[in-house]
């Protein structure tokens, strides 16, 4: 693709980040990232422009320190500047909701076939949730769902499954990424299997969560699994297992919680892609966030490489 031929009308996909780690991971996925396209002087957003496959991508960041510029405001401005935007991918880290039925590991990817928008129209406490009004369920855009199905078939036919774990290793060893230190630490812990965790339910009472690793030997295809299902998006971060379980009971089989997609959905059709960096239980560490940011970005890159630009 010739960068000299590009205009703002060339860009059709918005990639929304909410953390600098997510922005670093997104930039690593772009082919020839560039800011060569002139932008309006009155646009306060910051963008990284590039391409993936046959798509021209606009990457932007929601500043968590600017309370007047939430995800909806950033998306509205991006849509005004890049008037041909058709979809938004909200890509980054998220809090997973483990259960005995879902083999959900740190670093796995959750893709929201549907999202419960504004799930937190109610009152949340540290250990319980008083639900007043159910959020609205919004389905993922059909062209992206078709691309997801196509990508899943490719995974099924490929010797190495989704290949995400291999790409994380390559990214950690590469010279470009600003995530290298965190990725290398996470990969080291995974290789050591420090606590012998197996399955979705992590018992942190007897092991330092910073050293939590996963026994992945029983996974047939890859050490990073991709889960498809329901994501809850609102303005509230969940930091307690009892509240997490109460929300799942009220809303159904929630895989992950997100705090930005609900606002973006007021502007553009949206797909949520989250790398699991914690279990919504208050335990966090930086290098799991870096690993999860990388796995989510890699999946998004794979998906855009599959998406037919003539499908909408």
Image (cartoon, rainbow, N blue to C red):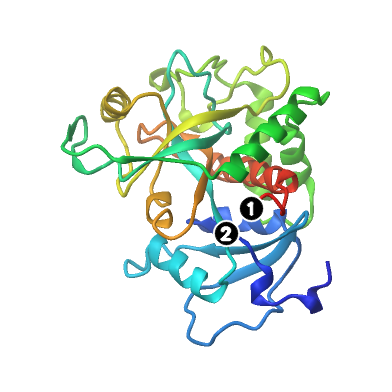
* Residue 153 x, y percent position in the rendering: 73, 27
* Residue 230 x, y percent position in the rendering: 44, 32
Q: Count of labels shown? A: 2
Secondary-structure class at tag 1: loop
* Residue 71 x, y percent position in the rendering: 41, 60
Nearest the camera: 32 or 241? 32
Secondary-structure class at tag 2: loop
| Residue at screen point 77% across, 57% down | 54
**Contact (Cβ within 8 Å) of mark 2 with mark 1:** yes
| Residue at screen point 33% across, 26% down | 248
Nearest the camera: 126 or 236? 236
| Residue at screen point 79% across, 55% down | 175
The correct choice, above or below, for 76 with respect to 236 in the image is below
Nearest the camera: 228 or 279? 228
Q: Is residue 179 left or right of residue 257?
A: right
Q: Is residue 272 visible?
A: yes
* Residue 304 x, y percent position in the rendering: 69, 48
The correct choice, above or below, for 201 with respect to 272 in the image is above
| Quarter location, residue 252 | top left
Q: Which mark is residue 251?
A: none
Discs 2/1, front? 1
CA separation in Å, label 2 and label 1: 9 Å
Q: Which mark is residue 312?
A: 1
Q: Earlier in the sequence, mark 2 or mark 1?
A: 2
Location of mark 2 (residue): 86
Q: Dividing the image into 4 quarters, which one contains the N terminus? A: bottom right
Q: Is residue 119 left or right of residue 190?
A: left
- Badge 2, how many Cα within 10 Å: few under 14, some, many 20+? some
- Badge 1, how many Cα within 10 Å: few under 14, some, many 20+? few
Nearest the camera: 304 or 26? 304
Q: Is residue 285 visible?
A: no
């Amino acid at each position: 693709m010739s960068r000299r031929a590009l205009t703002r009308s060339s860009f059709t996909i918005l990639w929304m980040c909410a953390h600098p780690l997510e922005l670093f991971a997104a930039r690593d996925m772009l082919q020839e990232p560039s800011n060569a396209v002139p932008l309006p002087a009155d646009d306060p957003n910051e963008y990284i422009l590039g391409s993936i496959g046959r798509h021209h991508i606009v990457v932007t960041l929601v500043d968590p320190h600017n309370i007047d510029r939430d995800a909806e405001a950033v998306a509205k401005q991006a849509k005004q500047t890049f008037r041909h935007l058709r979809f938004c991918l909200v890509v980054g880290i998220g809090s997973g909701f483990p259960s005995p039925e879902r083999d959900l590991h740190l670093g796995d990817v959750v893709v929201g076939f549907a999202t419960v928008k504004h799930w937190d129209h109610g009152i949340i406490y540290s250990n319980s949730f008083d639900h007043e009004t159910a959020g609205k369920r919004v389905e993922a855009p059909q062209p992206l769902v078709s691309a997801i199905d196509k990508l899943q078939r490719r995974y099924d036919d490929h010797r190495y499954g989704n290949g995400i774990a291999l790409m994380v290793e390559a990214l950690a060893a590469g010279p470009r990424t600003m995530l290298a230190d965190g990725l290398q630490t996470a990969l080291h812990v995974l290789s050591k299997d420090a606590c012998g965790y197996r399955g979705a339910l992590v018992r942190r009472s007897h092991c330092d969560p910073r050293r939590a690793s996963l026994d992945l030997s029983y996974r047939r295809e890859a050490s990073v699994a991709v889960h498809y299902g329901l994501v809850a998006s609102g303005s509230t971060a969940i930091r307690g297992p009892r509240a997490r379980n109460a929300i799942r009971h009220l809303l159904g089989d929630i895989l992950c919680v997100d705090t930005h997609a609900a606002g973006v959905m007021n502007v553009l059709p949206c797909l949520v892609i989250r790398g699991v960096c914690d279990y919504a239980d208050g335990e966090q560490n930086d290098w799991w966030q870096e690993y999860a940011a990388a796995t989510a970005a890699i999946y998004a890159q794979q998906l855009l490489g599959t998406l037919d630009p003539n499908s909408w």
